[in-house]
Image (cartoon, rainbow, N blue to C red):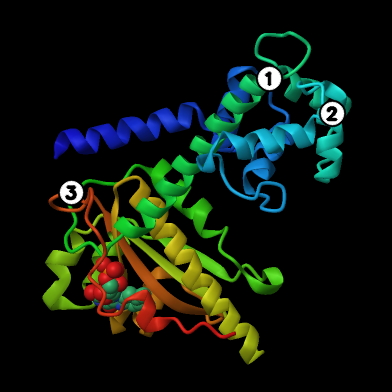
Amino acid sequence: MLIRNIVTVLIASAVQIVSGFHSLSPLSHRFTEKRITSQSSILLSRVLVSRPTLLKSTVDDGQQTLLDLFNKIDADNSGEICESELSSLLSSLSITASPSDVSALFSSLDVDASGTICFDEFSQWYSSTLSTQSDHTTSIHTNILSRHTAAQFEATTVPFQIVEDALECAVKAPNHRLTEPWRFYSLGSKSIEKVAGLVPSKKEKWSQIPGWMVFTSQRSPDSIINKENTYAVACSIQNFMLSLNSHSIGSKWMTTPFIFEEEFKRIVGISEEEEVIGCVWYGFEVGGNKGKGGTKRRKSVEDCLKVVE
Ligand SMILES: Cc1cc2nc3c(=O)[nH]c(=O)nc-3n(C[C@H](O)[C@H](O)[C@H](O)COP(=O)(O)O)c2cc1C
């Protein structure tokens, strides 16, 4: 257990060291290797693998499909793509790219520096982009499917970098009118002891929980905005928990009634203009949380879905 915690702490430190890479999409790896940081290069790879009208099916359907795409780009049917054809492709996809962006993208595709992109080069680039995209999708799904409510937490403190990352995800929640209604209260040991003491029978157990993040929403006199704000904060809590889960940190969304009481709000310092939405307990889960699925659901997607023609 200790080793797992140390590894997580080390990973968090490593993330700090390379935090300059945070803003880059995983799709950009191939380009960063070649020291190409052009946003349009990254955008192109995304567009090419996601635009269904351009690509009727994926490369998995066979080389013929990819060859069709290649031939479409190769407007003069020379059997190779030249820089101007690549530039036309970008324009036709409404991707704004400066001439130097186009050149950078072109040389990243032209692996043998022959001055043209042959089908082999195109196909290798496409396959690696597609597989990166697929890894990305799989890791998001795995994260969502493996998140679950943690039952018990170790006393070990979660590295702050991990919590900060999770809050960065929290503030990216969808939010109508961009009211940014969320406020976060990260409790330290003194306030944890005080709030845990509000339920004397639980004081000892709850005081051991290392992470307490209280989420509030800014109240609005407009009932619809108020509701939208609450929904947005709920999304921010989910983002927060998913980000923690991606670091193998367990969490539990908690709405035990005492968190809505005046004394709780007074200790935490929550103003009258805010409504408590929930408190997330988080920490290393006793027994580890790797590979656990969420609590079993009683309903399947079919039970819940009605397709309306
Ligand atoms: C709004 C909300 C409030 C919750 N409050 C509590 C709570 O007070 N105590 C608790 O044990 N779990 C609470 N949970 C966690 C749920 O019980 C849990 O998500 C549910 O059992 C499904 O399990 P899973 O998260 O492992 O998929 C809450 C969840 C939500 C979304």
Q: As shown in the figure, which amino acid type bears the numbered disc 2?
A: Glu
Q: CA distance from mark 3 to mark 2?
A: 53 Å
Whole-percent x, y for residue 195 in the image: 28, 71
Compare residues 53 and 236 and report the one nearer the observer: 53
The residue shown at (69%, 37%) is: 68
Q: Which mark is residue 223?
A: none
Q: Which mark is residue 108?
A: 1
Q: Which residue is mark 3?
A: 288
- Disc 2 Cβ-to-ligand 1 distance below 8 Å: no
Q: Tell me the element at label 1.
A: helix
Check contact, mark 3 vs mark 2: CB within 8 A: no
* Mark 2 surroundings within 10 Å by alpha-carbon count, few (fewer than 14), some (14 through 19), many (20 or more): some
The answer to whether residue 15 is left or right of residue 121 is left
The answer to whether residue 50 is left or right of residue 282 is right
The mark closer to the camera, 3 or 1, is 1
Q: Which residue is mark 2?
A: 85
Q: As shown in the figure, which amino acid type bears the numbered disc 3?
A: Gly
